[in-house]
Amino acid sequence: MKVLVAYASKYGFTRGIADFVADKMRENGVDTIAESVDKVSRPEDYDAFVIGSAVFLGKWMKQAHEFVTKNQQLLAKKPVWLFSSGPTGTSKTDKKGRDLLEASIPYDIADFKRIINPRDHHVFYGGFKVSQHGLGIRLLAKSATVREAMQEGDFRDWTAIGEWATGIAKELESLQRGSN
Ligand SMILES: Cc1cc2nc3c(=O)[nH]c(=O)nc-3n(C[C@H](O)[C@H](O)[C@H](O)COP(=O)(O)O)c2cc1C
């Protein structure tokens, strides 16, 4: 069984999550590689997929969205797990008191549930480093409101990411046992 972790990442935080998921799955005995969605040439060579994207303004990056829609017939027949790397900060709830990770589910996911029926979608905390951005974002980041919504730092929760990846490896193992 060969598994592809396909990701879209603008500033590198999501790539780090994808690499970590692939490492964890290999540690659990699953033949896994992580690759940017732009570089995937033969998706049909894989038996299962983990697909993830950074979230900007409530949406997955265009290339990740297109990877799913372009390959929807293949993905609908395979086990697929999705993840999004989004909220920054340490808060567990948003301003309205809702669970922050739940409230951060990007718009794309409802469509993906309909067209490829993924086994799971998980939102992970991401990261934001002001110096990686252009003047517009650097100026915006000076405002107190933006600083509150977009905290600077690396908020990736490696324990949660590792547990999620290990869970996928276990699920794949039992799927394989079931098909033998
Ligand atoms: C302009 C901008 C808009 C963003 N919009 C959202 C958003 O709508 N929802 C969210 O959860 N995170 C949002 N984020 C946070 C990013 O998704 C997060 O920093 C992510 O980890 C970046 O991943 P990358 O380094 O792989 O590009 C935004 C970040 C920036 C800079």
Image (spheres, grey):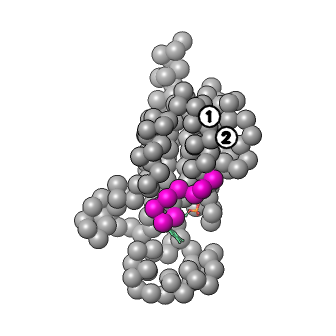
Where residue 103 appears, x then y in whole percent? Answer: 34, 59
User: Mark 2 to mark 1: distance in Å?
Assistant: 7 Å
Q: Which mark is residue 3?
A: 1
Mark yes or no: residue 22 visible.
no
Q: Position of residue 105 (x, y in %)?
A: 40, 54
SS at circle 1: strand
Q: Which residues are magenta?
A: 56-63
Are circles 2 and 1 on residues that touch, CB within 8 Å?
A: yes
In the drawing, does residue 110 fall left or right of residue 134?
left
Point out residue 9 in the picture as x, y percentages from the top left corner. Answer: 61, 58
Q: Residue at x 66, y 48 (%)?
A: 37
Task: Determine whether the beta carbon of the residue marked 1 sits less than 8 angstroms from the nearest atom of ligand 1.
Answer: no
Q: Nearer the viewer, residue 122 or 106?
A: 106
Question: Earlier along the polypeptide chain: callout 2 or callout 1?
Answer: 1
Task: Give the numbered dot on residue 33.
Answer: 2
| 46 on left or right of 84 | right
The kind of residue tagged 2 is: Ile
